[in-house]
Image (cartoon, helix red, strand yellow):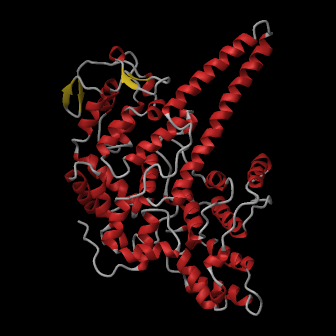
């Protein structure tokens, strides 16, 4: 079992909790966490006072907008059909393609706006754990705008995850069964009695609740029959089960027989002990470290079952455990790209990042919100880092600390059209905001080299810095002694620190 953390609540522990249960913060943020104390700060994270809609979503981000877009597209197609009467086939096809491009461009604009909106929420929220859990659920119940195509449905799903952030896992799974974005992503919309689609039935067991090896192929086939008949009315956003398309025959699932529907399948899944253990392990790996001992998984699984699948008691048990603050957990997690970008902006105290950074940074580093690579979500841990992405991280850090982007070459790996695209994206980011270095280090601190370096180390690093690394930081700062330690030079010192392997960890 996990023992409860006791003893002194240190600033190092406060910083660790702020980074893992949120997206990091400034030294002042760490200090405020430390002042609250362990129990109070965990309660603060789990019971935020900030309203969910504190940062309003885009006006188009609702089911009504989906209907309007559908009507608009239908009207546009009617107009094209009318306008192309009498045209040659080639001219008519060209007009239809132009109309389709217009629709796609609108969806792309809305998608970018939605991604930017969520990134801003992560950066500025006073409820960091709620946004971190929204990211967790987005990865767990992964869907991609590339297949869903309707940005509004991705935002609707995103809000569902936010509302259930610390809520009931079973209830959220029931809601996901009828979530429009998930239905389109896993083809539930097209599943019927005549042709049951196994996609959702398989993934709800393998990826969402039980894990591989904890169900049979017959369970999947019969569950697929149960999930038939669900239909999304794209004009109203309402999801119903069409009785005529539903297979109402008897089905055997997990050894039980009945005329089950999709809701019944979820209930059967949550009767299995493995369901709680599966989620407990995934939560621990997301917030603490990979491959926990079976003893930890079983104990946390019991916490979740005893709470009837309410997530709040599970999260509280994790964040109050001594193991969460152990050497095995602190400073051992590779920052995912979104964590890396948001945390760096917070530590540089930049509430208004350069225009376009949220999207270009995600694209360059390999994690784009609303675009996980497949239904299994992103690969985490060491998968985030390779030679190219590490170099890109260092470049982004340099661009932020300099306050601008350059269009130079970004390594031999970026050639031809790929490099040209990056250059265009970089050009979009010119004129971005820079850190206010006087807030990071005032003039008095700049006159004391060791104090300056140690202050920045405390600001940026979750892990102990080797003596040789600290020495290199000191040598750079000392080389500026005798002259004016300007914002430019302070930015270069920050860049030196941010361009180390140690900064990639939290």
At a point 41% along the width and 68% down the height, the residue shown is 17
Residue toward you, 226 or 494: 494
Q: Quadrant of residue 408?
A: bottom right
Q: Residue furthest top?
A: 86
Left or right of 468 in this view: 36:
left
The x and y percentages for residue 13 are 40, 75
* Left/right of residue 423 with respect to residue 37 in the rendered view: right
Residue 293, visible in the rendered structure: no
Q: Residue 429: x percent and y percent?
A: 73, 56
Give x and y (percent) for residue 141: 42, 43
The answer, for residue 231, to whether it is visible in the render is: yes
Number of numbered discs on residues: 0
Image vertical order of residue 273 relative to residue 343, above or below: above
Observer-nearest of 171 and 249: 171
Question: What residue sits 78% from the left and 54% below the top?
Answer: 427
Look at 25% across and 26% down and name the residue there.
260
Image location (x, y in percent) of residue 119: 56, 53
Tell me where residue 227 sits by quadrant: top left
Quadrant where the image shows the N terminus: bottom left
154 with respect to 302 (left or right):
right
Which residue occupies the foreground of this view, 292 or 27? 27
Q: Does residue 173 sit above or below 64 in this rendering?
A: below
Q: Identify the residue at image location x=49%, y=63%.
A: 23
């Amino acid at each position: 079992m996990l023992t409860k953390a006791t003893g002194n609540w240190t600033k190092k522990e406060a910083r660790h909790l702020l980074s893992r249960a949120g997206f990091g913060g400034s030294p002042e943020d760490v200090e405020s966490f430390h002042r609250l104390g362990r129990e109070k700060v965990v309660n603060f994270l789990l019971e935020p006072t900030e309203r969910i809609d504190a940062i309003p979503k885009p006006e188009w981000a609702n089911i009504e907008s989906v209907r309007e877009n559908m009507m608009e597209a239908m009207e546009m197609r009617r107009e094209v059909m009318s306008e192309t009467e009498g045209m040659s086939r080639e001219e008519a096809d060209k007009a239809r393609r132009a109309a389709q491009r217009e629709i796609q461009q609108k969806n792309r604009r809305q998608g970018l706006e939605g991604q930017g909106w969520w990134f801003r929420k992560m950066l500025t929220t006073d409820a960091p754990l709620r946004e971190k859990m929204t990211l967790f659920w987005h990865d767990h119940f992964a869907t991609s705008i590339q297949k869903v195509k309707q940005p509004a449905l991705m935002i609707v799903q995103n809000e569902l995850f936010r509302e259930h952030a610390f809520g009931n896992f079973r209830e959220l799974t029931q809601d996901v069964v009828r979530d429009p974005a998930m239905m389109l992503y896993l083809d539930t919309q097209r599943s019927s009695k005549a042709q049951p689609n196994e996609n959702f039935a398989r993934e709800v067991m393998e990826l969402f609740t039980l894990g591989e090896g904890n169900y049979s192929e017959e369970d999947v086939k019969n569950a697929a029959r149960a999930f038939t008949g669900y239909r999304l009315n794209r004009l109203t956003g309402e999801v119903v089960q069409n009785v005529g398309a539903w297979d109402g025959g008897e089905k055997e699932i997990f050894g039980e027989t009945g005329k089950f529907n999709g809701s019944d399948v979820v209930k059967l899944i949550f009767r299995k002990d493995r369901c709680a253990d599966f989620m407990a392990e995934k939560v621990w790996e997301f917030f603490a470290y990979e491959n926990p001992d079976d003893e930890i998984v079983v104990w946390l699984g019991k916490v979740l079952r005893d709470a009837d699948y309410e997530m709040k008691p599970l999260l509280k048990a994790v964040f109050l455990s001594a193991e969460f603050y152990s050497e095995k957990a602190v400073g051992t997690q590779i920052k995912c790209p979104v964590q890396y970008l948001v945390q760096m902006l917070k530590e540089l105290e930049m509430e208004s990042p350069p225009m376009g950074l949220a999207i270009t940074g995600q694209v360059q580093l390999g994690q784009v919100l609303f675009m996980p690579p497949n239904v299994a979500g992103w690969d985490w841990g060491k998968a985030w880092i390779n030679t190219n992405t590490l170099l890109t991280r260092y470049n982004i850090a340099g661009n932020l600390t300099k306050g601008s982007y350059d269009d130079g070459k970004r390594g031999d790996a970026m050639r031809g059209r790929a490099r040209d695209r990056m250059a265009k994206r970089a050009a979009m980011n010119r004129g971005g905001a820079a850190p206010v270095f006087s807030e990071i280090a005032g003039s008095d601190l700049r006159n004391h080299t060791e104090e300056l370096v140690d202050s920045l180390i405390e600001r940026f690093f979750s892990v102990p810095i080797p003596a040789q690394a600290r020495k290199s930081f000191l040598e750079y700062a000392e080389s500026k002694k005798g002259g004016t330690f300007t914002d430019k030079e302070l930015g270069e010192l920050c860049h030196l620190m941010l361009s180390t392997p140690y900064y990639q960890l939290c």
